[in-house]
Amino acid sequence: MSGFPQPMHRRHFLAGAATGLTALGLTTASTARAAPLPSPPTTWTQALLDADPRLIAFVNGTEHDQAARIEGRLPRGLAGVLYRNGPGLFEHGSDRYRHWFDGDGLIQRWSIGPQGVSYRSRFAATPKFRTEHKAGQFVLPVSGGGIRPAAAFAGANSVNPSNTAVLPVNGALWALWEGGSPLQLDPASLAAGNHVDLGDGTGGAPFSAHPRVGADGRVWNVGSLGSRVLLYRLDQTGRLEAARVQPLGQPGYYHDFILTERSLVLVQCSTAPDGRQSLINGSFGSMRGVAGKPMKVHVFDRESFELVRQAELPPGFAFHFGNGWEEADGTIRFDIVHDPNGDEMLEFFKPMEGRFPTWGSATCLVILPPKGAPRFEPIMARTEFPVINPALRTRRNRYVYASALTGGNPEGWFTAVTKIDLDRNAHQVCEFGPDWLVEEHVFVPDPKGRREDHGWLVGSALNWRLGKTALTVIDARDLERGPIAKAWLDLAQPLRLHAQFV
Ligand SMILES: [Fe+2]
């Protein structure tokens, strides 16, 4: 295991780890479920719904257990659990957050099998959540502001909402944020344990919500540290193999990255600190877009973590990448969801103000030769949440699937799922229709399938007109059929972020 290159880095992390949970007296694992929260509608929720009934997508979610009602026919080979995480608690007493990303994590678990589909949702019972639940109000500072903190910031994990994604690890489940450590969850009950301390001084350090898994099952990840980045490599059981801090010369925000069979590729967006003091290194609350500033690509050897190449891309911002792979001559190809607006993060203040975000993002292809300028080719506008067949991670893939906003109005939420054919520069669309707000769909391979697109796109969507959320299944070979099965809840849950199928 390689340690940090300089002693100061190690001290930095140890200090962060020591102050977080202990200062709140919450270092003991809790498997107790929090008592139910007050249900909407509150005054603010009602104002949102009066303004636009679609905004039911951004009100407090609820803890819930239910057998879902099946419409259509579930594919015979589809069995497993879809987990999804995302912000789910925005309003507490008379306080509400200003930025969508600040909401506490609400984990949902859809169990799919011959018996049908059952649903469970639980708030991520972090130290932050338990402290605020006990207090009956928000008391800890958040990146987007909007509350008067009544409890001291005591390290990143004291404010960690564990609200962005999940990672299945060796039979366990971690709820991920990006500014602090993973949170351990029981994969069946969703009861929370402690934040994970990976060791080597990384406890409490930023750990992104988009770890990448190699073909051998090892896991790579990054953490934003101002003008440095923390690179992680974990073995197949989730134990830390290596961690290293690398300087990047200027502050950046790293939500996601690309992993190939040899490289870890980091894209530094066209942002700079806005001058405000931020509690969380490189968080959305601390960065602003810089017009005309090129994005910068940093290529690291994924085993040694040495920086091996750098390149520039057109200005803009990117949260997500679908996949990347490397050719024999060292050419790296990857897809990027690129928004020329470097302030894309500001769009997500809007839902808390009663408006939908405006989407300027497009899926683009980047071809990075060993020498010379990269090629940058737009492929499909107004798309987000790219996924691929997980069997092809780090290797050449033909298809990328993504959520899509169709209909021409850039303001709103996704109403479709698309299948992009990178080889033919063509796409297919599964339209849900105007009553739907569509969340990320992940690719689940058909166990009997042989081709890259033999499988299903499994996700969830909110029918705002009916006020109901459903699990939705799409045949990845034929998106234009529309969803082939839905599993309905009898209530609406807020839109959430990333899913994993186990
Ligand atoms: Fe993300």
Image (cartoon, rainbow, N blue to C red):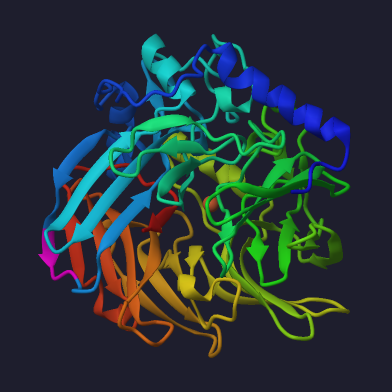
Is any part of residue 136 visible from this angle? Answer: no
Q: Is residue 261 placed above or below 396 in the rendered structure?
A: above
Q: Is residue 430 placed above or below 153 in the rendered structure?
A: below
Q: In the rendered view, does 220 fall on the left or right side of 117?
A: right
User: What is the span of residues highlighted in magenta in the rendered image?
Assistant: 70-74
> In this orientation, which residue lies closer to the viewer: 352 or 82?
82
* Residue displayed at 65% across by 58% down: 257
* Residue displayed at 84% across by 59% down: 306
* Residue displayed at 49% across by 16% down: 26
Residue 109, percent from left and from top: 29, 47
Q: Is residue 443 placed above or below 54 in the rendered structure?
A: below
* Residue displayed at 54% across by 9% down: 150
In which quadrant is the C terminus drawn?
Answer: bottom left
* Outermost residue toward the bottom in this view: 424
Residue 14, percent from left and from top: 73, 26
Q: In the rendered view, does 285 fall on the left or right side of 66?
A: right
> In this orientation, which residue lies closer to the viewer: 90 or 291?
90
Residue 302, percent from left and from top: 73, 62
Secondary structure mostly seen in the magenta stretch: strand
> In which quadrant of the rendered view does residue 337 lie?
bottom right
Is any part of residue 115 visible from this angle? Answer: yes
Q: In the rendered view, does 502 fall on the left or right side of 4?
A: left
